[in-house]
């Protein structure tokens, strides 16, 4: 005897139901610098793992500013082909995000700290600068030692 289970997503449970019985459209989520970095990092990681149809370079081209893309290519060349987003030759197992100290942000921009955790052990902090008017990532840098 087979049992069938109907799966319901958490998002579906949160949607109001219309008079016709169909879920109402959800309001678009507010975009934030943390959310933009998390979305980019998650999608980029999936591309690096080969779990989606796009390549990491395509995700970068679609998401990051053109000058940043050029900087990342140069960074990778200087660092022996290490991934310029992850700042390593491997792919992180997990990551966490937090607001970076205000001293690391500039007017019109917000800095997000991403702590990457590796399969081999250890972690690394990378800073993402997000331009506030359009929430575009404009810089990716290693965190200064005093900032952690």
Image (spheres, rainbow, N blue to C red):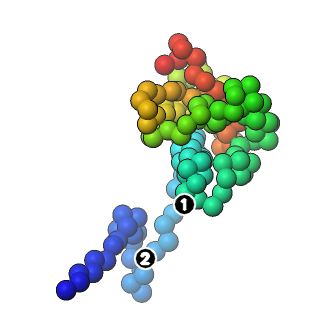
> Which residue: 70% across, 28% down?
80
**Which residue is more in the foreground, 68 or 121?**
121
Q: Nearer the viewer, residue 90 or 131?
A: 90
Residue 49 percent location from the top left of the image = 55, 50
The numbered mark, 2 or 1, whose residue comes first in the sequence reads 2
Cβ–Cβ under 8 Å for marks 2 and 1: no
At label 1, counting other C-alpha atoms closer than 10 Å, the crowd grade (few under 14, some 14-19, many 20 or more) is few
Which residue was labeled with disc 2? 23
Determine which of the numbered discs, if any, sits on residue 102 in the image.
Answer: none
Say whether residue 24 is left or right of residue 53: left
Q: Does 2 appear above or below 55? A: below
Marks 2/1: CA–CA distance? 15 Å
Image quadrant of residue 96?
top left
Q: What element carries label 2?
A: loop
* Closer-to-camera residue (94/113): 94
Splitting the image into 4 quarters, where does residue 33 fall?
top right
What residue lies at 71% left-to-right and 52% top-to-bottom? 58
Q: Position of residue 42 (x, y in %)?
A: 53, 48
Q: Can you identify the residue that label 1 sits on?
A: 28
Where does residue 30 sit, x and y in percent of width and height? Answer: 54, 52
In this rendering, does residue 99 appear at all? no
In the rendering, at what x and y percent does residue 86 appear? 59, 35
Residue drawn at x 56%, y 46% is 45
Residue in the picture at 37% in, 67% down: 9
Above or below 141: residue 48: below
Q: In this view, does 64 lie above or below 86?
A: below
- Furthest residue in direction top, as rendered: 146
Vertical position of residue 144 compared to residue 139: above or below: above
- Quadrant occupied by the N terminus: bottom left
Badge 1 element: loop
Dot 2: within a 10 Å radius of its alpha carbon, few (fewer than 14), some, or many (20 or more) residues? some
């Amino acid at each position: 005897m087979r049992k069938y289970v109907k799966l319901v997503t958490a998002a579906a449970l949160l949607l109001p139901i219309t008079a016709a019985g169909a879920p109402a459209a959800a309001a678009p989520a507010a975009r934030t610098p943390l959310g933009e970095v998390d979305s980019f990092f998650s999608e980029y990681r999936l591309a690096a793992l080969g779990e989606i149809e796009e390549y990491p370079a395509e995700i970068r081209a679609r998401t990051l500013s053109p000058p940043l893309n050029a900087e990342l290519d140069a960074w990778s060349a200087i660092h022996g082909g290490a991934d310029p987003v992850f700042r390593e030759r491997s792919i992180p197992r997990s990551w966490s995000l937090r607001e970076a100290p205000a001293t690391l942000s500039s007017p019109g921009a917000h800095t997000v700290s991403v702590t990457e955790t590796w399969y081999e052990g250890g972690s690394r902090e990378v800073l993402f600068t997000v331009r506030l008017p359009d929430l575009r990532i404009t810089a990716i840098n290693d965190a200064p030692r005093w900032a952690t």
